Image (tube, rainbow, N blue to C red):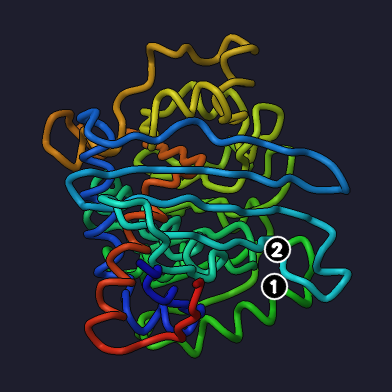
């Protein structure tokens, strides 16, 4: 018997099929399955070389009938070559037969599900009245991070921090044109001015060293820390981790890969047992989220293929129902 044609979905297809609000709900379900031990998500395999990192990440979520693998690369010098920093594809398979069903453009899926994870964390951990957002990073991840936060909170001001002033201004111009920002003001700012008085702080950079001025982080702030994904890189200082209530996407993955936490542990600012919860436990109501208005909360995400596979499988189901995407015969 011949294999069914493989459905190929572009970045534009994906965004039409899965709006951000839907993606937040999908990743909430995936996180709950992970925290309850109902998903198989092996630690990612890293291959270093050539100035970058290649990662391979499988996942199976039986309750969602979803199976697949993601191949992603992060090459920080790519923009100088006219290429994106992150490139990726996600293969979705039939959970019953293993047959390949679809191939999705993975960089946009990565940005969508990572943004959605932070949107979920912001919904569960930030103060309901949070309105001022400090955003570190001006790449594709920063765009969906901001969109997701705006999907769950009434953001009135966005302060953008970028290493390259011209890129930061281009990001500001782009953001001002997005309908989901409504009437919020968007400005470029220095790190200290961006963080001072901010309710929500997002770090979505490729910096290997801290970018957030810890002394400026006010009581009651919430941080989404998503850029660093190796044991030796971090975007926030150990002392800031030490004063925060820390929630992670996966305890196992965070304690294997999250430099923000591992370096804080090595410096004596933090300890593994101080991880408050996995975000899936909070989403399921099994652990509390924010407990008081003065609490500093920090969501650390290193990324998990469970989200790519969950969102990708749903996108494929919607694509099949609507005839979206291209088909390629494999046999």
Residue that protrudes farthest toward the left in the picture: 285
Q: Is residue 44 above or below residue 275?
A: below
Q: Is residue 45 above or below residue 201?
A: above
The picture quadrant where one finds residue 61 is: top left
- Residue 100 horizontal side relative to residue 61, left or right: right
Quick check: can you spot residue 9? Answer: yes
- Image location (x, y in percent) of residue 108: 52, 69
Q: How many marks?
A: 2
- Image location (x, y in percent) of residue 181: 39, 80
Residues at circles 1 and 2 in contact by the CB criterion of under 8 Å: yes
- Image location (x, y in percent) of residue 328: 50, 80
Residue that carries the numbered disc 1 in the rendered image? 168
Mark found first going from the N terminus, 1 or 2: 2
* Residue at horizontal 52 percent and vertical 77 percent from the top: 186
* Residue at horizontal 29 percent and vertical 27 percent from the top: 277
Distance Cα–Cα, label 1 vs label 2:
5 Å
Q: Could you say which disc has been placed on residue 162 in the image?
A: 2
Quick check: can you spot residue 294? Answer: no
Nearer to the camera, 121 or 320: 320
| Secondary-structure class at tag 2 | loop
* Residue at horizontal 54 percent and vertical 64 percent from the top: 106
Mark 1: give few (<14), some (14-19) or many (20+) Cα within 10 Å.
many
């Amino acid at each position: 018997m011949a294999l069914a044609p493989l459905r190929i979905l572009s970045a534009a297809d994906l965004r039409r099929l899965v709006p951000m609000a839907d993606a937040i709900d999908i990743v909430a379900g995936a996180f709950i399955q992970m925290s309850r031990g109902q998903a198989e998500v092996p630690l990612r395999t890293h291959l270093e070389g050539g100035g970058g990192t290649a990662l391979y990440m499988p996942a199976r979520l039986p309750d969602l009938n979803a199976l697949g693998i993601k191949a992603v690369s992060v090459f920080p010098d790519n923009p100088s070559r006219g290429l994106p920093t992150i490139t990726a594809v996600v293969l979705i398979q039939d959970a019953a037969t293993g047959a390949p069903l679809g191939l999705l453009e993975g960089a946009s899926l990565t940005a969508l599900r990572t943004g959605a994870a932070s949107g979920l964390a912001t919904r569960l951990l930030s103060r309901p009245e949070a309105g001022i957002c400090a955003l570190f990073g001006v790449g594709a991840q920063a765009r969906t991070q901001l969109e997701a936060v705006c999907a769950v909170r009434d953001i009135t001001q966005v302060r953008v921090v970028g290493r390259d002033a011209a890129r930061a201004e281009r990001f500001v111009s782009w953001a001002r044109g997005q309908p989901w920002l409504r009437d919020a003001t968007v400005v470029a700012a220095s790190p200290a001015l961006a963080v001072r008085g901010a309710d929500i702080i997002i770090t979505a950079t490729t910096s290997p060293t801290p970018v957030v001025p810890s002394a400026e982080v006010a009581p009651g702030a919430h941080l989404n820390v998503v850029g660093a994904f190796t044991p030796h890189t971090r975007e926030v200082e150990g002392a800031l981790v030490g004063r925060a209530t820390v929630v992670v996407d996966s305890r196992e993955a965070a304690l294997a890969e999250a430099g923000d936490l591992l370096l804080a542990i090595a410096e004596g600012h933090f300890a593994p047992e101080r991880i408050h919860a996995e975000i899936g436990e909070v989403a399921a109501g099994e652990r509390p989220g924010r407990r008081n208005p003065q609490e500093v909360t920090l969501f650390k995400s290193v990324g998990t293929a469970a989200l790519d596979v969950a969102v990708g499988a749903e996108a494929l189901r919607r694509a099949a129902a609507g005839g979206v995407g291209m088909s390629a015969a494999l046999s």
